[in-house]
Amino acid sequence: MTLQSVLIANRGEIAVRIIRACRLQGIYTIAIFSSDDTHSLHVKMADECFSLGSGSVQETYLNIPKILEILDKSNADAVHPGYGFLSENAEFAKAVEASGKIFIGPKSEIIDYLGDKIKAKNIAREVGLPVVPGSTGFVHTFEEAKQIAEDIGYPIIIKSAFGGGGRGMERVNSVHTLRSAFEGCQAISEQFFGRKEVFIEKFIKNPRHIEIQFIGDHFGNVIHLGDRECSIQRSNQKLIEEAPSFLDRNIVDELGEKVCDLAKNLGYVNAGTAEFLWKDNHLYFNEINPRIQVEHPVTEMITGIDLVVEQLKVAAGEPLSYKQDEISFQGHAIEFRINAEDPYAQNLPQSGKITQVIIPGGSNVRFDTFIYPQYSIPNHFDSLVGKLIVWGKNREQAILMARNALKELTISGVKTNIELHQAIIETREYQQWLISTGFLNQINITKILRNYEYMKIAAISQVFELFNISQQNIVPEVPKNPIRNMWRESARREQVR
Ligand code: ADP
Ligand code: ADP
Ligand code: MG
């Protein structure tokens, strides 16, 4: 069968992304929106829209009865949940299944199973994937927590068993803060995820975050689409992602195979991601996200495969369009999450009217967004306003592409983290690929932003110098052995510009 119409149970850039994939497949698109999103791009782009009314996220995009009611009223065959919101909500997936419509994702039982991070770790162990050392079940009491912490050794991390989005994680360095962290994590888990169960893991200091993209169909085929590295994070949330990761290709092949085994064991259908932490040549399985991921475009850029289109095809009951040996990887891609937030003020989310947007272009540059000039960013959603994705034939070229694209990208009216990205890519650590999830904590953000400012000023003063020289009709002398440094090169680029 082919899908005729899809309801998109999401907003923002991912709703726009899904509409585009549907259009490629000739599928009619149905958007839902809260009153704050009346002027959002996904509403303008969809073929049909249904209002969720006004109110909090709980009353709108997380309101299962209301969304089911719209689904019933609409002629949609299927629901695409995107990421965040209800994408990992097994109850929602189950209700969609019960209504006779298609949930574009794995079966509700699989979502339910993987939502429990302990169960996911146990099944990973079964296929021979190493997991982060820690408790093998929920930890219910402080005494139990104390014993486990002593067994595995401090520092440890207490995690919500049903958590997500970087929330519900608490690092503990010694027994002195264990009780407050344990009880605090239980309370946050209850508040955000409706389940207070927590578990304990060894805290891995400054690991790298590596993940494998996979997809399965209804015929038992599962393939992987290689790896991504998402080590540049803040508050356990990804900020810059790239593909491939720094890992040796043999290791990735082996890892990919094991992840496919795991997915096959589960009877997994549709797209998913297995996340790992890497430290000192050891890889540890972390969790599986049973949905499309924010950073899926970097995989698309190096494989040439449209992952959302594949999701739609698989959901319609078609077999996967590719076999494992037909997947090849070209070059390097980097994604920058453009957030409306103030990097100078603890990343405080920003809202308000956008006065100007200049979107970078040229070949191998992609910008996925839902903002446009005069659009007002509402204040109670995620701060992600766009994703800049660039491709180069190797990492060095991709960084060069990123430097130019970030310079072109202009968003005025609200503060964004564009300058932070510009500053990060000029650091030695980023350029030499010596990064870890602790990178942004270890460096002084204000300092790298200031260095970036100096770099710009130095570039401008060199332009003035050149201008003065050319006024005097003197050809500037080119040094015999020009010292290749960041400032000089940036000044040269500025001159060319
Ligand atoms: P990804 O895993 O796709 O790289 P994130 O983990 O950053 O992306 O999550 C994607 C989005 O979904 C973010 O906006 C995040 O806040 C949100 N999110 C993820 N998991 C949950 C959850 N369990 N509850 C609420 N929001 C979530
Ligand atoms: P979420 O479901 O919120 O995405 P994850 O378990 O995937 O949570 O962890 C998100 C991030 O938190 C990881 O990418 C990593 O930076 C950090 N993290 C998680 N577990 C550990 C650990 N055991 N040690 C150190 N850092 C961790
Ligand atoms: Mg995660």
Image (cartoon, rainbow, N blue to C red):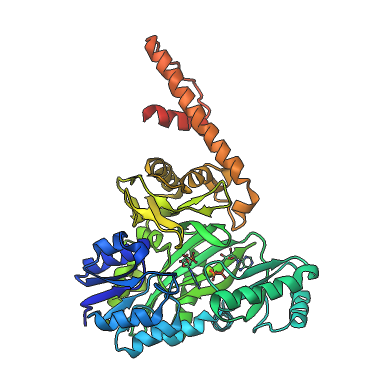
Indicate the position of residue 192 as horizontal and vertical percent values: 55, 74
Q: Is residue 211 visible?
A: yes
Which quarter of the picture shows residue 292?
Answer: bottom left
The answer to which of 336 and 410 lies nearer the viewer is 410
Q: Quadrant of the N terminus?
A: bottom left
The answer to which of 395 and 209 lies nearer the viewer is 209
Indicate the position of residue 463 as horizontal and vertical percent values: 43, 23
Q: Is residue 322 visible?
A: no
The vertical placement of 95 against 451, above or below, is below
Q: Residue at x 49, y 21 (%)?
A: 480
Q: Residue at x 44, y 20 (%)?
A: 464
Count of picture labels: 0
Q: Residue at x 77, y 77 (%)?
A: 146
Apparent side of residue 25 relative to residue 366 in the rendered image (left or right): left
Q: Residue at x 62, y 81 (%)?
A: 197
Q: Quadrant of the C terminus?
A: top left
The answer to which of 489 and 237 lies nearer the viewer is 237
The vertical placement of 255 against 268, above or below, is above
The answer to which of 344 and 242 lies nearer the viewer is 344
Q: Residue furthest front?
A: 54
Indicate the position of residue 355 as horizontal and vertical percent values: 35, 45
Q: Residue furthest right?
A: 176
Indicate the position of residue 449 as horizontal and vertical percent values: 55, 41
Which quarter of the picture shows residue 270?
Answer: bottom left
Q: Residue furthest top?
A: 472
